Image (cartoon, coloured by chain):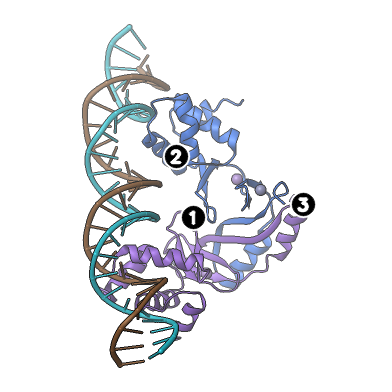
Chain colours: A blue, B purple, C brown, D cyan
Amino acid sequence: MKNYTDTLRSHNLKATPQRLAITDILYAHGHISIESLYDVMIKKFSSISLATIYKNINLMLENSFIQEVKLPNQKTVYELTKHSHSHIMCDRCGMVNDITIDLNAIVNTVSTLENFEVSKADLVLSGVCKNCA
Amino acid sequence: MKNYTDTLRSHNLKATPQRLAITDILYAHGHISIESLYDVMIKKFSSISLATIYKNINLMLENSFIQEVKLPNQKTVYELTKHSHSHIMCDRCGMVNDITIDLNAIVNTVSTLENFEVSKADLVLSGVCKNCA
DNA sequence: CGATTAAAGGATAAAAATTATTATTCATTT
DNA sequence: AAATGAATAATAATTTTTATCCTTTAATCG
Ligand SMILES: [Mn+2]
Ligand SMILES: [Mn+2]
Ligand SMILES: [Zn+2]
Ligand SMILES: [Zn+2]
Protein backbone atom coordinates (compact mmCIF):
# COMPACT_ATOMS: atom_id res chain seq x y z
CA MET A 1 0.00 0.00 0.00
CA LYS A 2 1.37 3.36 -1.07
CA ASN A 3 2.25 5.85 1.67
CA TYR A 4 0.58 9.18 1.01
CA THR A 5 2.44 11.23 3.60
CA ASP A 6 4.50 13.13 1.06
CA THR A 7 1.63 13.47 -1.36
CA LEU A 8 -0.48 15.10 1.33
CA ARG A 9 2.34 17.45 2.25
CA SER A 10 2.88 18.41 -1.35
CA HIS A 11 -0.73 19.59 -1.31
CA ASN A 12 -0.07 21.68 1.83
CA LEU A 13 -1.93 19.21 4.01
CA LYS A 14 -0.52 17.90 7.26
CA ALA A 15 -0.18 14.15 7.24
CA THR A 16 -2.41 13.21 10.14
CA PRO A 17 -3.49 9.62 10.83
CA GLN A 18 -7.06 10.54 9.93
CA ARG A 19 -6.04 11.97 6.58
CA LEU A 20 -3.81 9.07 5.78
CA ALA A 21 -6.71 6.76 6.56
CA ILE A 22 -9.09 8.76 4.37
CA THR A 23 -6.55 8.59 1.59
CA ASP A 24 -6.08 4.84 1.99
CA ILE A 25 -9.82 4.31 1.94
CA LEU A 26 -10.24 6.44 -1.16
CA TYR A 27 -7.46 4.48 -2.81
CA ALA A 28 -8.99 1.15 -1.83
CA HIS A 29 -12.58 2.01 -2.73
CA GLY A 30 -11.96 4.09 -5.81
CA HIS A 31 -15.17 6.07 -5.31
CA ILE A 32 -16.90 6.59 -1.99
CA SER A 33 -19.64 8.76 -0.48
CA ILE A 34 -19.27 10.85 2.67
CA GLU A 35 -21.60 8.51 4.48
CA SER A 36 -19.69 5.35 3.55
CA LEU A 37 -16.38 7.00 4.25
CA TYR A 38 -17.57 7.86 7.73
CA ASP A 39 -18.76 4.30 8.28
CA VAL A 40 -15.33 2.96 7.43
CA MET A 41 -13.46 5.65 9.35
CA ILE A 42 -15.42 5.14 12.55
CA LYS A 43 -14.07 1.60 12.72
CA LYS A 44 -10.51 2.87 12.86
CA PHE A 45 -11.19 6.03 14.86
CA SER A 46 -14.03 5.21 17.19
CA SER A 47 -14.42 8.83 18.27
CA ILE A 48 -13.93 10.61 14.96
CA SER A 49 -16.35 13.40 14.24
CA LEU A 50 -18.36 13.57 11.05
CA ALA A 51 -17.30 17.20 10.91
CA THR A 52 -13.71 16.08 10.54
CA ILE A 53 -14.69 14.06 7.51
CA TYR A 54 -16.41 17.05 5.94
CA LYS A 55 -13.60 19.43 6.74
CA ASN A 56 -10.99 17.14 5.29
CA ILE A 57 -12.97 16.30 2.21
CA ASN A 58 -13.58 19.99 1.55
CA LEU A 59 -9.95 20.87 2.15
CA MET A 60 -8.75 18.09 -0.10
CA LEU A 61 -11.17 19.26 -2.76
CA GLU A 62 -9.86 22.82 -2.56
CA ASN A 63 -6.34 21.54 -2.94
CA SER A 64 -7.34 19.29 -5.82
CA PHE A 65 -6.00 16.33 -3.92
CA ILE A 66 -9.36 14.65 -4.49
CA GLN A 67 -12.30 15.39 -6.74
CA GLU A 68 -16.03 14.88 -6.54
CA VAL A 69 -18.21 12.94 -8.92
CA LYS A 70 -21.87 13.88 -9.03
CA LEU A 71 -24.08 10.99 -10.03
CA PRO A 72 -27.69 10.87 -11.21
CA ASN A 73 -30.06 9.65 -8.49
CA GLN A 74 -27.21 8.84 -6.15
CA LYS A 75 -25.08 10.51 -3.57
CA THR A 76 -21.98 12.33 -4.64
CA VAL A 77 -18.82 10.25 -4.40
CA TYR A 78 -15.19 11.27 -4.04
CA GLU A 79 -11.98 9.89 -5.46
CA LEU A 80 -8.28 10.63 -5.52
CA THR A 81 -7.47 13.02 -8.32
CA LYS A 82 -6.20 11.21 -11.36
CA HIS A 83 -5.99 11.80 -15.07
CA SER A 84 -9.19 13.14 -16.60
CA HIS A 85 -11.68 10.35 -17.12
CA SER A 86 -15.36 9.49 -17.35
CA HIS A 87 -17.60 7.13 -15.42
CA ILE A 88 -20.06 4.33 -15.85
CA MET A 89 -22.64 3.75 -13.14
CA CYS A 90 -24.88 0.74 -12.73
CA ASP A 91 -28.48 1.59 -11.87
CA ARG A 92 -28.97 -1.84 -10.32
CA CYS A 93 -26.01 -2.33 -8.00
CA GLY A 94 -24.67 1.21 -7.80
CA MET A 95 -21.24 0.27 -9.09
CA VAL A 96 -19.15 3.20 -10.33
CA ASN A 97 -16.14 2.61 -12.56
CA ASP A 98 -13.68 4.70 -14.44
CA ILE A 99 -13.56 4.68 -18.19
CA THR A 100 -11.16 6.45 -20.48
CA ILE A 101 -12.75 7.96 -23.54
CA ASP A 102 -11.37 10.50 -25.92
CA LEU A 103 -13.73 13.45 -25.79
CA ASN A 104 -11.51 15.80 -27.76
CA ALA A 105 -13.64 15.65 -30.88
CA ILE A 106 -16.72 16.61 -28.89
CA VAL A 107 -14.91 19.32 -26.97
CA ASN A 108 -13.58 20.83 -30.18
CA THR A 109 -16.96 20.74 -31.85
CA VAL A 110 -18.58 22.55 -28.96
CA SER A 111 -15.77 25.06 -28.64
CA THR A 112 -16.17 26.23 -32.18
CA LEU A 113 -19.89 25.69 -32.67
CA GLU A 114 -21.01 27.29 -29.42
CA ASN A 115 -18.08 29.62 -29.04
CA PHE A 116 -17.53 28.16 -25.61
CA GLU A 117 -14.11 27.59 -24.09
CA VAL A 118 -14.31 24.11 -22.57
CA SER A 119 -12.02 23.39 -19.64
CA LYS A 120 -13.61 20.26 -18.21
CA ALA A 121 -15.90 17.48 -19.32
CA ASP A 122 -17.96 15.47 -16.85
CA LEU A 123 -19.54 12.42 -18.36
CA VAL A 124 -21.49 9.71 -16.57
CA LEU A 125 -22.98 6.85 -18.51
CA SER A 126 -25.61 4.99 -16.55
CA GLY A 127 -27.15 1.65 -17.30
CA VAL A 128 -26.67 -1.98 -16.34
CA CYS A 129 -23.29 -3.55 -15.64
CA LYS A 130 -22.26 -6.99 -16.83
CA ASN A 131 -22.81 -8.55 -13.40
CA CYS A 132 -26.37 -7.27 -13.17
CA ALA A 133 -27.33 -7.97 -16.78
CA MET B 1 -47.07 31.11 -23.65
CA LYS B 2 -48.03 27.47 -23.84
CA ASN B 3 -50.71 26.20 -21.48
CA TYR B 4 -49.48 23.15 -19.63
CA THR B 5 -52.80 22.09 -18.12
CA ASP B 6 -53.22 19.06 -20.32
CA THR B 7 -49.55 18.16 -20.20
CA LEU B 8 -49.71 18.07 -16.42
CA ARG B 9 -52.84 15.96 -16.49
CA SER B 10 -51.31 13.53 -18.94
CA HIS B 11 -48.63 12.97 -16.32
CA ASN B 12 -51.28 12.27 -13.68
CA LEU B 13 -50.74 15.61 -12.04
CA LYS B 14 -53.58 17.92 -11.11
CA ALA B 15 -53.28 21.25 -12.84
CA THR B 16 -53.09 23.57 -9.88
CA PRO B 17 -52.13 27.22 -10.22
CA GLN B 18 -48.91 26.52 -8.32
CA ARG B 19 -47.93 23.74 -10.69
CA LEU B 20 -48.80 25.77 -13.75
CA ALA B 21 -46.62 28.54 -12.40
CA ILE B 22 -43.73 26.16 -11.73
CA THR B 23 -44.08 24.88 -15.24
CA ASP B 24 -44.12 28.36 -16.72
CA ILE B 25 -41.05 29.31 -14.75
CA LEU B 26 -39.21 26.19 -15.81
CA TYR B 27 -40.15 26.94 -19.39
CA ALA B 28 -39.03 30.55 -19.12
CA HIS B 29 -35.78 29.88 -17.28
CA GLY B 30 -34.77 26.67 -18.94
CA HIS B 31 -32.81 25.50 -15.91
CA ILE B 32 -33.47 26.58 -12.35
CA SER B 33 -32.50 25.58 -8.82
CA ILE B 34 -34.95 24.91 -6.00
CA GLU B 35 -33.83 28.07 -4.28
CA SER B 36 -34.33 30.31 -7.33
CA LEU B 37 -37.61 28.65 -8.15
CA TYR B 38 -38.86 29.44 -4.67
CA ASP B 39 -37.70 33.06 -4.97
CA VAL B 40 -39.72 33.47 -8.15
CA MET B 41 -42.75 31.59 -6.88
CA ILE B 42 -43.02 33.58 -3.66
CA LYS B 43 -43.65 36.67 -5.76
CA LYS B 44 -46.74 35.12 -7.29
CA PHE B 45 -47.88 33.13 -4.25
CA SER B 46 -46.89 35.16 -1.24
CA SER B 47 -47.80 32.38 1.18
CA ILE B 48 -46.46 29.38 -0.70
CA SER B 49 -44.55 26.90 1.39
CA LEU B 50 -41.10 25.73 0.43
CA ALA B 51 -42.41 22.24 1.14
CA THR B 52 -44.84 22.66 -1.74
CA ILE B 53 -41.93 23.37 -4.06
CA TYR B 54 -40.11 20.27 -2.92
CA LYS B 55 -43.21 18.09 -3.06
CA ASN B 56 -44.02 19.19 -6.57
CA ILE B 57 -40.50 18.96 -7.88
CA ASN B 58 -40.19 15.44 -6.49
CA LEU B 59 -43.55 14.42 -7.89
CA MET B 60 -42.74 15.87 -11.28
CA LEU B 61 -39.44 14.04 -11.24
CA GLU B 62 -41.13 10.74 -10.47
CA ASN B 63 -43.51 11.29 -13.34
CA SER B 64 -40.67 12.28 -15.65
CA PHE B 65 -42.40 15.56 -16.31
CA ILE B 66 -39.17 17.27 -15.38
CA GLN B 67 -35.60 16.10 -14.91
CA GLU B 68 -32.69 17.13 -12.78
CA VAL B 69 -29.26 18.22 -13.93
CA LYS B 70 -26.41 17.83 -11.49
CA LEU B 71 -23.66 20.35 -12.03
CA PRO B 72 -20.06 20.46 -10.77
CA ASN B 73 -19.61 22.98 -7.94
CA GLN B 74 -23.14 24.26 -8.27
CA LYS B 75 -26.60 23.46 -7.06
CA THR B 76 -28.70 20.97 -8.93
CA VAL B 77 -31.05 22.54 -11.45
CA TYR B 78 -34.30 21.30 -12.95
CA GLU B 79 -35.81 21.54 -16.40
CA LEU B 80 -38.82 20.35 -18.34
CA THR B 81 -38.16 16.96 -19.84
CA LYS B 82 -37.11 17.22 -23.44
CA HIS B 83 -35.17 15.17 -25.94
CA SER B 84 -31.91 13.80 -24.59
CA HIS B 85 -29.22 16.45 -24.59
CA SER B 86 -26.04 17.65 -22.93
CA HIS B 87 -25.07 20.86 -21.18
CA ILE B 88 -22.47 23.57 -21.12
CA MET B 89 -21.93 25.51 -17.93
CA CYS B 90 -19.98 28.72 -17.50
CA ASP B 91 -17.74 28.78 -14.43
CA ARG B 92 -17.79 32.58 -14.41
CA CYS B 93 -21.46 33.53 -14.71
CA GLY B 94 -23.12 30.19 -13.96
CA MET B 95 -24.97 30.09 -17.27
CA VAL B 96 -26.30 26.65 -18.22
CA ASN B 97 -27.28 25.91 -21.80
CA ASP B 98 -28.43 22.92 -23.76
CA ILE B 99 -26.31 21.45 -26.48
CA THR B 100 -27.12 18.61 -28.80
CA ILE B 101 -24.27 16.25 -29.43
CA ASP B 102 -24.32 12.82 -30.91
CA LEU B 103 -22.91 10.51 -28.26
CA ASN B 104 -23.83 7.29 -30.04
CA ALA B 105 -20.28 6.51 -31.05
CA ILE B 106 -19.13 6.83 -27.46
CA VAL B 107 -22.06 4.87 -26.09
CA ASN B 108 -21.44 2.05 -28.55
CA THR B 109 -17.75 1.94 -27.78
CA VAL B 110 -18.41 1.66 -24.07
CA SER B 111 -21.18 -0.88 -24.52
CA THR B 112 -18.93 -3.29 -26.32
CA LEU B 113 -15.61 -2.49 -24.68
CA GLU B 114 -16.85 -2.50 -21.11
CA ASN B 115 -19.71 -4.89 -21.64
CA PHE B 116 -21.98 -2.28 -20.11
CA GLU B 117 -25.51 -1.64 -21.28
CA VAL B 118 -25.78 2.15 -21.47
CA SER B 119 -29.23 3.65 -21.04
CA LYS B 120 -28.40 7.27 -20.33
CA ALA B 121 -25.52 9.68 -20.85
CA ASP B 122 -25.08 12.75 -18.69
CA LEU B 123 -22.50 15.15 -20.02
CA VAL B 124 -21.64 18.59 -18.69
CA LEU B 125 -18.93 20.64 -20.31
CA SER B 126 -17.72 23.46 -18.11
CA GLY B 127 -15.61 26.42 -19.03
CA VAL B 128 -16.05 30.01 -20.06
CA CYS B 129 -18.93 31.26 -22.19
CA LYS B 130 -18.57 33.77 -24.98
CA ASN B 131 -19.94 36.61 -22.86
CA CYS B 132 -17.44 36.02 -20.10
CA ALA B 133 -14.46 35.36 -22.35
C1' DC C 1 -73.84 24.25 -11.61
C1' DG C 2 -73.50 22.15 -6.63
C1' DA C 3 -72.12 18.21 -3.89
C1' DT C 4 -68.49 14.67 -3.28
C1' DT C 5 -63.92 13.11 -2.83
C1' DA C 6 -59.22 12.37 -3.45
C1' DA C 7 -55.44 15.15 -3.92
C1' DA C 8 -52.79 19.42 -3.12
C1' DG C 9 -51.46 23.42 -0.41
C1' DG C 10 -49.90 25.84 3.88
C1' DA C 11 -48.04 25.75 8.40
C1' DT C 12 -45.11 23.62 11.04
C1' DA C 13 -42.28 20.09 13.01
C1' DA C 14 -38.85 16.78 12.29
C1' DA C 15 -35.02 14.74 10.14
C1' DA C 16 -30.88 14.83 7.47
C1' DA C 17 -26.93 17.14 5.72
C1' DT C 18 -23.52 20.55 6.19
C1' DT C 19 -20.96 24.23 8.36
C1' DA C 20 -19.25 26.97 12.35
C1' DT C 21 -17.17 27.37 16.96
C1' DT C 22 -13.98 26.33 20.51
C1' DA C 23 -11.13 23.93 23.77
C1' DT C 24 -7.87 20.26 23.50
C1' DT C 25 -4.52 17.47 21.20
C1' DC C 26 -1.04 16.66 17.86
C1' DA C 27 2.40 17.18 13.78
C1' DT C 28 6.06 19.76 12.42
C1' DT C 29 9.79 22.98 13.04
C1' DT C 30 13.39 24.74 15.71
C1' DA D 1 12.46 18.54 24.06
C1' DA D 2 9.76 22.94 23.66
C1' DA D 3 7.12 26.01 20.90
C1' DT D 4 3.64 26.87 17.63
C1' DG D 5 0.35 26.60 14.24
C1' DA D 6 -2.82 23.42 12.57
C1' DA D 7 -6.04 19.42 13.14
C1' DT D 8 -9.31 16.93 15.96
C1' DA D 9 -13.41 16.07 18.77
C1' DA D 10 -17.36 17.71 20.71
C1' DT D 11 -20.92 20.44 20.12
C1' DA D 12 -23.89 24.00 18.44
C1' DA D 13 -25.85 26.23 14.64
C1' DT D 14 -27.36 26.47 10.02
C1' DT D 15 -29.11 24.76 5.83
C1' DT D 16 -31.58 21.53 3.16
C1' DT D 17 -35.08 18.19 2.69
C1' DT D 18 -38.91 15.40 4.21
C1' DA D 19 -43.02 14.27 7.13
C1' DT D 20 -47.36 15.41 9.46
C1' DC D 21 -51.66 17.53 10.11
C1' DC D 22 -55.30 20.19 8.90
C1' DT D 23 -57.49 23.19 5.43
C1' DT D 24 -58.44 24.16 0.72
C1' DT D 25 -59.24 22.97 -3.96
C1' DA D 26 -59.33 20.52 -8.62
C1' DA D 27 -61.66 17.01 -10.85
C1' DT D 28 -65.68 14.13 -11.30
C1' DC D 29 -70.48 13.22 -11.70
C1' DG D 30 -75.36 13.75 -11.25
MN1 LIG E 1 -13.29 8.05 -11.20
MN1 LIG F 1 -31.12 21.11 -20.39
ZN1 LIG G 1 -24.60 -3.69 -11.52
ZN1 LIG H 1 -20.31 33.21 -18.57
Identify the residue at image location x=74%, y=56%. B111
Chain label for disc 1 = B
Q: Residue C12 at what x, y percent from top left?
A: 22, 57
Between circles 3 and 1, the one closer to the viewer is: 3
Image-based side of B119 in relation to C9, left or right: right
Residue corresponding to mark 1: B72
**Residue D21's image quarter?**
bottom left
Circle 3 Cα neighbour tier, 10 Å, few/some/many (<14 / 14–19 / ≥20): few
Taking depth in this image into account, of A118 and B67 the one nearest to the observer is B67
Tell me what residue is drawn at x 42 percent, y 36 percent.
A53
> How many labels sit on residues?
3
Residue that carries the numbered disc 3 in the rendered image: B113
Q: In the rendered image, is residue B130 in sight? A: no
Q: How dense is the environment of label 2, judged by Cα within 10 Å: few (below 14), some, or many (20 and up)? A: many
Q: Secondary structure at mark 3?
A: helix
Marks 1 and 2 in Cβ contact (< 8 Å):
no
Give me the chain letter of mark 3.
B
Residue at x 49% of width, y 58% of height: B71
> Distance of mark 3 from mark 1, alpha carbons?
27 Å
Residue that label 2 marks = A57
Evaluate if marks 3 and 1 touch, with contact meaning CB atoms under 8 Å apart.
no
> Mark 1: few, some, or many residues within 10 Å (few <14, many ≥20)?
some
The mark that comes first in sequence, 3 or 1, is: 1
Which amino acid lies under the numbered mark 2 shown in the image of this protein?
Ile
